[in-house]
Every structure is written in structure tokens, then in C-alpha cells.
Image (spheres, grey):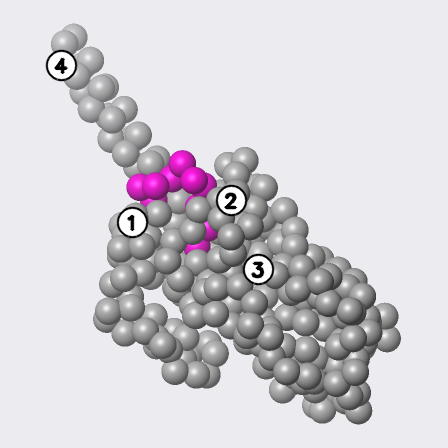
Amino acid sequence: MKKLVLAAAFAALAAGTVNAEAIRMGTEGAYPPYNFINDNGEVDGFEREVGDKLCEIAKLDCTWVTNDWDSIIPNLVSGNYDTIIAGMSITPERDEVIDFTQEYFPPDPSAYVALAGADDSVIHGVVAAQTSTIQANYVANTDATVVEYATLDDTIAAVRSGEADAVLADRGPLNDIVSESNGELVFVGDDVAIGGGVGIGVRESDAELKAKLNAAIDQMKADGSLNALIEKWFDRPGPY
């Protein structure tokens, strides 16, 4: 009987350890090339590859969860997943609510895009931005009128329909959108530096998870694998 009790105790301990290593990676799934849903209905993109490699290095059993951008931080805090890996810039405002790992992607300049033929004056008109982003906050503090939309695709649709004069977003995702528009869309105005690098968001109580992810990011920077993925997905040299 004593052996059975001990065996059950060890089994429970082992199960607890497995559960502690099971991590849910939260992302948006609508912000290529950072993250998107592929034709098989799976999370794909730069952050999927980075996240899977980090989990391999840190020996974490990771699954992927998608969540709308405007509620992505509240749902991390409430426990619906354990990380945010979704092109999220590290800012003091966000850092008051959640914690961040070190950056795994350098600060990406923000850029304005408008319909071909537009001049730089459109950046002072009606500017679309994705809700709860550093770009929406930036436009709200300029002489332009900000109109917020749920997704980046919605902001581009607003420009195409004439609801907005321009969109402000990270330049990385906009590069592909402009290049694939067959000349319909163009960059206007100057790039804007907003926010810090992109990091993985974790709950403030998850210091151990943060440490594991930081160590894994260090390894990817040191061995060149992070630079290789940046070059693959963004067609530019990685800075690490």
C-alpha cells in the first residue's frame, strides 16, 4: 500500500512538471509577415518560426492560440494564454500592465501609405491605424484625425474606399502590401520612429518563464538563427 501511495505521489509530481512546461503562445494571426493564418488554417510567419525555435531551446511544450489584437493584453493577464508573440513593441505603457522579454526584433519604423497620386499632405488628414497600437496613439497626438480599425487589413481597406486618406503602420508589413498593390498604394511622408523593439509579453508573475525565453533568445542571437529568420521573412539583414 505504501509503495502504491509513493508511486501515485511521484506520478502526480511528474504530471505537475509536464503541465508547468506546457505553454500557450498567443498571437494575432493577422499581421504578416510577423504572423498570419496559412492555407492549412495554421499560425505561420516569422513569429511562428521564432516561437517554435525558442520553445525547442527552452524545452517548452508550446501550442499556438490566436486572439484579436484589441483584447490581446487583457486575455494574457486573465490566463487565456501564457505569452504574447505578435509584433508587439515594448512601450512603458504596456510594461505597466505586463512584462516583456528582451527584444527579438529591432524597432521597426512606422510609415504612411496612401493611394497613388496622393501627396504628403494626406498625413494631416484622416489617418487609419489599427486599434490599441502605438501608431493609433501617435496619430491621436498629431494634427490628423485618427480612425481606428480592428486589423491592418481593415485600415488598408479604409484607404482604398476613401474612408481614410492614409494609414500609419509598421513599415515591415506595409512593404509587402505596397509591393503587391500593383502601384495602387504608395508610401508618403517620412517614416516615424515610435516605440522600442518587439518583445514577448508575459504576465508579471511569470518571471521563470521570462528567464527561460530570454536565455533562448540569447542563444538564437548568438548562433545566428534569429538573423537568418529576419532575413528570410523581411528580406533584410538581421542586426544581431
- Indicate whether 102 appears above or below 97: below
* Type of the residue with mark 1: Lys
* Type of the residue with mark 2: Glu
Give the x, y percent position of residue 131.
69, 57
Q: Which mark sits nearer the N-terminus, 4 or 2? A: 4
Left or right of 195? Residue 145 is right
For residue 212, which numbered disc appears in the image? 1
Give the x, y percent position of residue 37.
57, 63
- Crowding around mark 4 (Cα neighbors within 10 Å: few <14, some 14 to 19, many 20+) is few
State the separation of the CA atoms marked 1 and 4.
35 Å
SS for tag 1?
helix
Asked which quadrant contains residue 10, the reply is top left
Asked which quadrant contains residue 11, the reply is top left
SS for tag 4?
helix
The residue wearing badge 3 is 29
Which quadrant is the N terminus positioned in?
top left
Q: Farthest top residue?
A: 1
The residue wearing badge 4 is 3
State the separation of the CA atoms marked 3 and 1.
24 Å
State the separation of the CA atoms marked 2 and 3.
25 Å
Q: Nearer the viewer, mark 2 or mark 3?
A: 2
Q: Which mark sits nearer the N-terminus, 2 or 1? A: 2
The residue wearing badge 2 is 96
Asked which quadrant contains residue 144, the reply is bottom right
- Number of callouts in the render? 4
Left or right of 38? Residue 185 is right
